[in-house]
Image (cartoon, grey):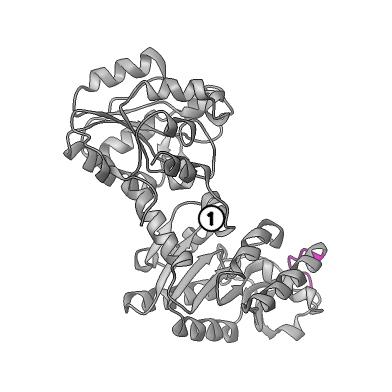
Amino acid sequence: MRDFKTIDDFDVAGKRVLIRVDLNVPMTSGVVADAIRIERTVPTIKELLAKGASVVVMSHLGRPKGKVVPSMSLKPVGEALARVLGREVPFAADCVGPAAGDAIDAAGPGGVTLLENLRFHPEEEANDPAFAGKLAELGHIYVNDAFSCAHRAHASTAAIASLLPAAAGRLMEAELKALAGALDRAARPLMAIVGGAKVSTKVAVLGNLVGKVDVVAIGGGMANTFLAAQGIDVGKSLCERDMAGTARDIMARAIEQGCEIALPIDAVVARELKEGAATQTVMLDRVPADSMILDVGPATVAELTARLRRCKTLVWNGPLGAFETPPFDRATNAVAREAAALTRAGKLVSVAGGGDTVAALARARVMGDFSYVTMAGGAFLEWLEGRELPGIAALKRGV
């Protein structure tokens, strides 16, 4: 049973629906460079319109720190939103007050209005109740469709949910369903792949996962720290030697919890990180002193893909190597394509998220083949840590 309302629980006909989305998209010379977040937002907006609602869209862009920064205006994002929606989207020069109200009135019944960047007001990030009240005055129902912002207790994600009837949008609903199915109600065996540069940024993630999954496969620079903690010489590789004790503690906890930690057994090394660099594939007791581990090797890939074939569920956060620089993307690509193939065959439920992970899966051309890929970065990490997200907690309190 879900413990939050969705748009199915409300009659929105003739109502103004305030919808918090994440339009924090990459911009190049004032133009949207990647519209995937816009595209994922549109289905909820279209459904609300089809049900007779007027839709008022709220978002942030960048980090203007409570000041008006023209280069972070949402106006060009509104133009992109209009193209994806296939209809006019009037833009409000502010997110509260007369400018917002006038733009909404001008859009008329059944219209769509985009408000200016919420973070132009310092009260947004302060979760100020008075500011939330000003936002709430603009609508009759509140919908949160921005899981990627749910880890922030801001006025538009937390305080407002107690002021209006509140519901999860379709994207938020899909994210929560996918994440619950991947960890809390997962089919077993359950495997997590955790990569990235530093153990220090994912201590809480690893600490939570070893108590929930059957196998944690560690890659990227993080693996070097675990290897060094076991006395393996990793040469000039990225390695947080001061985290060795923490790595050993995580391995000890995994044993207590019956979770296996899978570390690389071979590596691709080079003297420099650049495209086309001369490489060697070595076992981990043969890493040259003047080289860096920049990817896991083929024996590790074979082991990981064999493990995947025995699993029912996969949660993935972080690449296995320096995937941005070929040829150090090979392991990530190979494992991603195997996970995608197993998912297509109905043998694996695969959920992935985080900025680098999304980029890596896009490079491997398997984004559409995973069961679910979340655009969320910080929110996905905090969910992996087992933390309650303020934006989700606010929706649940509104039930």
Image x and y of residue 223, in percent: 68, 71
- The residue under the point 74% across, 76% down is 227
Please, what is the three-letter code of the amino acid marked with disc 1?
Answer: Trp
- Magenta residues, start to end: 235-241
Residue 290 position by quadrant: bottom right
Position above or below: 179 against 364: above
The residue tagged 1 is 383
Taking depth in this image into account, of 205 and 268 the one nearest to the observer is 205
Dominant secondary structure (helix, strand or loop) of the stretch shown in magenta: loop
- The residue under the point 36% across, 57% down is 1
Residue 248 position by quadrant: bottom right
Q: Quadrant of the C terminus?
A: top left
| Residue 95 seen in the figure | no
- Mark 1 is surrounded, within 10 Å at the Cα level, by few (under 14), some (14 to 19) or many (20 or more) other residues, namely some
| Residue 393 seen in the figure | yes
Taking depth in this image into account, of 72 and 140 the one nearest to the observer is 140
Residue 45 position by quadrant: top left
**Numbered-mark total:** 1
Taking depth in this image into account, of 75 and 193 the one nearest to the observer is 193
Which residue lies most toward the top here? 98
Residue 181: say if magenta. no
Query: Does residue 54 appear left or right of residue 143 in this picture?
Result: left
